[in-house]
Image: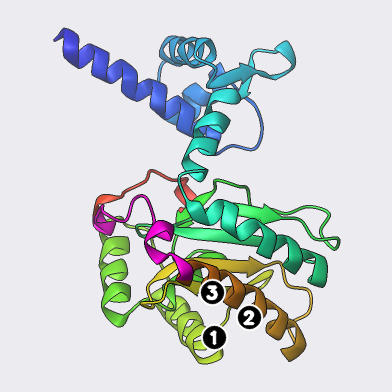
Amino acid sequence: MARTAVNSSAIHVFEVLRLVARTDEPMGVSEISRRLGLPASTVYRALITLEESDYLVRFQNMPRYELGPMPQLLNRALVHRFRLHAASRPHLRRLAERTGDTASLTVRLGWYGLRLAGVYGSHDIYHRDRLGEVLPLHRGAARLGMLAFLTDEDRDAYRRFAERQRLGVDWAAVEALVEAARERGVAFDPLAAALPVRDPAGHVLASISISAVERDAASEAIWRAARDELEAEIAQAPASFASPFAHIPADDIVLNLARDAG
């Protein structure tokens, strides 16, 4: 019974952390309690635990909480496990300088895409995507830039995964976007464009995305040149650029994301 109580308490701590992590505004005990359906006393104990371990901090010394330094440190440790993080930055920087648009690298993590690196362009005042953000492969140009260029077998496997996870995907819309991306070689959403980054064997490792202002042939040529330069660097030592999580079957990587992640 004691072990069950400990496990239950730990689950509540992680529930509180996930809720605060995916919410833009600092949150207090009563709101967290209402959103999670937990007693205020349980929420308060979880908040104290998370505050003492630096996962959460008080916002301006008020009884409201936001993410602390520990998640940032963990996120940084994860990012640096990918060699693509350091390798991509010079290419992203040149791309941002040439286009004025924010350029990002998103890597494949099972059936998800992790935004690994980004360089702001002069056109951008605010970029909505955060470094370390993880979303399913059908969400947004950066991840469609990978999904569209997987094999037919892998895309079918992704569909089965998404249905098991009840992500609520509009498959007709996704398939139309995939078909358009495969035909053009670039995936688009209303705010961005993305191209796949592959190893020499043709496996999709990542995507380069651009908060695209211009979408003409000249702009696409600049995007492709940056992607091709990164792929050429990967080709020199492909094994070292493999995902550190490539040994884990994609179906075994299941992340608890925000409710609107579908």
**Circle 1 SS class:** loop
Task: Work out whether 16 lies above or below 116.
Answer: above
Q: Which residue is mark 1?
A: 185
Q: Quadrant of residue 218?
A: bottom right
Is residue 96 rendered magenta in the image? no
Q: Where's the C terminus, which quadrant?
A: bottom left
Do callouts 2 and 1 mark residues in contact (Cβ within 8 Å)? yes
**Which residues fall within the magenta stretch?**
236-251
Secondary structure under badge 3?
helix
Q: Quadrant of residue 241?
A: bottom left
- Marks 3 and 1, the one that precedes in the sequence: 1
Q: Where does label 3 land, which residue?
A: 232
Residue 90 location in percent, x, y? 68, 59
Circle 2 is placed at which residue position?
224
Q: Quadrant of residue 198?
A: bottom left
Q: Nearer the viewer, residue 161 or 221?
A: 221
Crowd rating for badge 2 (residues with CA inside 10 Å; few <14, some 14–19, many 20+): some
Residue at mark 2 to residue at mark 3: CA–CA distance: 12 Å
User: Dot 3, how many residues are within 10 Å of its Cα: few (below 14), some (14-19), or many (20+)?
Assistant: some
Residue 154 in percent (x, y) is at: 29, 73
Spatial CA span between label 2 and label 1: 9 Å
